[in-house]
Image (tube, rainbow, N blue to C red):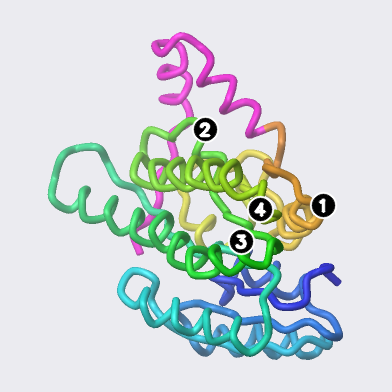
């Protein structure tokens, strides 16, 4: 059980989002599960129902159908007030900083989903949460938001933007009683992680990452870094003189297969 009763979860069809949806489930809990893959969402909804929750699904593309997604979220809130929204959907693939049109297209797509998409999921509920002086927002960024890997600058930029946006929201909304938690996970087992070609330090099961992130979210943590050691390492690199930090990052080369 989560402590939350009505929750919106994006990117819920697989990986971390599916793991969080299952962990949030229990008697009396209602979920709205968002994702692109309707069949996968239905399987997650079934697992949530087996745990006692009521789970609705809405299959849509965050890069192309944001207005429809916002309307569905508000309709879910109209049925009964939501108390939590989790913006988890994301894309990750390599974008070599070579200035080619394809590299810009891939970077823009990641920004559309990882940053603008998160805004589209959380944004519709923010005025309502503030008016009710209640509600909790979880934004799933990445440890890459602290220091971007050299082979994934587009992904790192999108997650850094989400981290900073979330921190600004937290400062703005906390006086109104709205809680904002920014999660910065590292490597966990998922289809996205499997596409990475290179070292994946401190890799953990998706369910374990979900457990740790939701533990922080329930207690109202400002940020949850999972695993903490990897996040601290990348933050330390950002404190080094740029030449030393850049050299260290070049030793940690990771390539991601395109979608």
The mark that comes first in sequence, 2 or 4, is 2
Name the spot of residue 84 as percent of width and height, x first.
68, 67
What SS does tag 1 mark?
Answer: loop
Return the residue nearer the eye: 256 or 70.
70
Q: Are marks 4 and 3 in contact (CB under 8 Å)?
A: yes
What SS does tag 2 mark?
Answer: loop
Q: Nearer the viewer, mark 4 or mark 1?
A: 4
Q: Are marks 4 and 1 in contact (CB under 8 Å)?
A: no
Hey, which residue is sitting farthest front in the picture?
A: 131
Image vertical order of residue 233 relative to residue 79, above or below: above
Name the spot of residue 6 as percent of width and height, x first.
71, 78
Alpha carbon distance from label 4 to label 1: 17 Å
Q: Magenta span covers which residues?
A: 230-259
Q: Which residue is mark 4?
A: 176
Q: Which residue is mark 2?
A: 146
Q: Any mark on residue 55, and which?
A: none
Q: Are marks 1 and 3 in contact (CB under 8 Å)?
A: no
Q: Which residue is mark 1?
A: 219
Characterize the local packing of mark 2: few (<14), some (14-19) or many (20 or more) Cα atoms within 10 angstroms: many
Alpha carbon distance from label 2 to label 3: 29 Å
The part of the image, by quadrant, that contains residue 167 is top right
What residue is drawn where x is 43% and y is 35%?
A: 149
Q: Which residue is mark 3?
A: 130
Q: Nearer the viewer, mark 2 or mark 3?
A: 3
């Amino acid at each position: 059980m989560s402590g939350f009763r009505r929750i919106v979860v994006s990117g819920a069809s697989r990986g971390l989002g599916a793991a969080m949806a299952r962990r949030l489930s229990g008697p009396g809990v209602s979920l709205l599960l968002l994702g692109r893959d309707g069949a996968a969402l239905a399987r997650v909804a079934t697992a949530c129902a087996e745990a006692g929750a009521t789970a609705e699904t809405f299959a849509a593309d965050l890069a192309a159908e944001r207005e429809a997604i916002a309307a569905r979220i508000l309709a879910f809130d109209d049925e009964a007030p939501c108390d939590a929204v989790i913006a988890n959907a994301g894309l990750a693939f390599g974008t070599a900083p070579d200035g080619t049109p394809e590299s810009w297209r891939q970077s823009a797509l990641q920004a559309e989903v990882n940053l603008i998409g998160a805004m589209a999921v959380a944004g519709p509920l923010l005025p309502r949460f503030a008016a009710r002086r209640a509600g909790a927002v979880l934004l799933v960024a990445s440890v890459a938001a602290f220091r971007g890997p050299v082979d994934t600058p587009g992904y790192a930029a999108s997650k850094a933007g989400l981290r900073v946006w979330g921190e600004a929201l937290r400062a703005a909304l906390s006086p109104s009683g709205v809680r904002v938690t920014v999660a910065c996970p590292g490597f966990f087992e998922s289809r996205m992680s499997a596409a990475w070609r290179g070292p994946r330090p401190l890799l953990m099961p998706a369910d374990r990452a979900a457990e740790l992130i939701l533990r922080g979210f329930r207690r109202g943590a400002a940020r949850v870094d999972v695993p903490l050691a990897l996040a601290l390492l990348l933050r330390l690199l950002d404190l080094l003189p740029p030449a030393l930090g850049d050299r260290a990052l070049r030793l940690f080369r990771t390539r991601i297969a395109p979608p």
